[in-house]
Image (cartoon, rainbow, N blue to C red):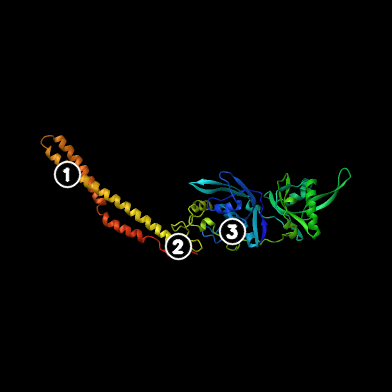
Amino acid sequence: MTTYALNDRGSLEIVTENFYDAEILRVFGALSHNTVETYAGTAELVPEPDNPFDSQTIAVRVGRHQVGHLAKDDAARYWPAVTRVVASGLSPTAPVIIKASLVDADGTDEVDATARIQLSPPDLLFPVNSPPQRSTVLPQGPSIKVLDEQDHAAYLHSILPKSGEARLFLTLEVNQVRTAHGEHVDIVEVLHERQVVGRLSTQLSEQFIPVIRHAFEHDLLTAVWGTIRGSAFEVSLTVQAARPEAIEADWYQELPRLGEELVPESDSYEVPNAYVPTEAERGKNAKKWRRGMSAAGAAPASNGTGRFRSFRGSGSTSTSTAASTAAGSDAAAGNHAAATWTQSSRVTAMVLAGVTVVLLLVALLMLGREPLVSALAVIVAAATGGMALYLRSLFGPLRSSGSAQSARGTDDQPSAETMTPNG
C-alpha cells in the first residue's frame, strides 16, 4: 500500500504502557537494564474498527510491530482524517520517537517505554492543493526555510487561509540567475501553482539540483510538502523535504507521484478490519491490560482467567480447564480455612460458657458474704455468657452450611464453554 505522509508539525504522546513490551523490544532488537535507548523512524497509523475494546482505536505500528495506540480522546479527533486516508487506499504515516529501557519488576524484566508521534492537529494534516499531475513528490523531512518569500508577500497573503496556517504542495525548479559579481549560478526556485514564491539557499540548491534534474529527465517536476503561516502583517514559508543524502535509492527508481488521491471529505469512511492482538493480549498473562485501556478509554471484559472473552484464537479449552482446576483448588483452600476458623470459634464459645458457669457459682457463694464481689461476678458472667451465645449463634450451624458453600464453590466454576474466547 502506498504511504501518505501526514503533516508532522506537532507532537503527540501515544499509549505504550505494558502490553506492547514484546513488540517494542523487537523494534529495538535488544535493550539494556536502566539505560534508556532511542528509536527514531516512521510509524503507520492503523484504524481498527473491529477492535473488541474500542471501535475507534488507532494503532501505531512500526513495520509489523504495534508499539502503541492513540489515547481515546486523540483517536476520536484523528479518526476522520486517518480513516479518510485509509479509505483512499493509502497508508497514513508519521515520524515516531520511542525511548525505552529494561527495568526489574519483582524479579521479572519489563520494558519501560514512552513514545511520541510527530503529528499536526487534524485540521492541518492535508494540503490545500494538489501537486502538478506530472510530478514526483520528495519524501517528507525536516523543515527548510524558504528565502526571499517577502518579495512575494502579496501573492502569499492571497493564499493564506483565515486560520493563519496551512499545508500545501510546492514545486522546486532549477533556474539560472546572475549574481552581483556578474556570475551566472544555478539556484532552486520554489513555486506554488506555477508562481514563484521564494528560493532555497545556494548551499541547499547545490544539493537538490541533481535530484530535480533526475526527475526532469523522466519528464517529471519535483514537488515537495510545504507549510505557509502568517498574519496580516507577515508571512513565512517552509519546505518539509528529506535532504538528498537521506533519500533512499527506491525513490529514484519509483519516482512516486501524488495527485487527487484522497476521497472527498465525508462524515464517515469505510475502512477494512485491521485489529491484531498483541502478544500480551494473546498470552495468558494480560494483567496489565486494564491500566493501558484506561488510557485508551475502554475497559476490557474479562472472564476471570487473565484472558479476554472477546479475543479471537484457539487454545481456549486447555486454558479453561487449567483455570477451572486452579479455581477449584482455591475454593477448596478457602473452605478448609473457613472450617478451621469455625472450629476455633466453637472452642472459644465453649470456654466462655464454662467461665460463665464458674462466675455464676462464685456469685451465689458470695451473695451473703461479699455483695459487691457477687454483683461484679454476675456482671462479668453476663458479658461472657452473652459472648458465648453470640459465637454459638454465629458459627454453630456452619457445619452444614459450610458443606453447602463448598458445593456452591464447585458449581460456580465456569465451564469450558463459558471460558472459551468469543469470535
The type of residue carrying mark 2 is Ser
Residue that carries the numbered disc 2 in the rendered image: 318
Disc 3: CA contacts within 10 A as few (<14), some (14-19) or many (>=20):
many
Q: For this view, does 309 lie left or right of residue 367?
A: right
Residue drawn at x 36%, y 56% is 331
Q: For this view, does 401 lie left or right of residue 115?
A: left
What is the C-alpha distance between the residues marked 3 and 1? 77 Å
Residue that carries the numbered disc 3 in the rendered image: 47
Query: Tag 1 or tag 2, which sits nearer the N-term?
Result: 2
Residue 357 coordinates in the image, percent (x, y): 17, 44
Residue 4 coordinates in the image, percent (x, y): 67, 57
Residue 202 coordinates in the image, percent (x, y): 80, 46
Disc 2: CA contacts within 10 A as few (<14), some (14-19) or many (>=20):
few
Badge 3 element? strand
Front-most of residues 366 and 335: 335
Residue that carries the numbered disc 1 in the rendered image: 357
Badge 2 element? helix
Is there a contact, CB below 8 Å, between mark 2 and mark 1? Answer: no
Figure check: 168 above or below 272: above
Residue 118 visible, this orientation:
no
Foreground mark, 3 or 2, reads 2
Residue 180 coordinates in the image, percent (x, y): 87, 43
The type of residue carrying mark 3 is Pro
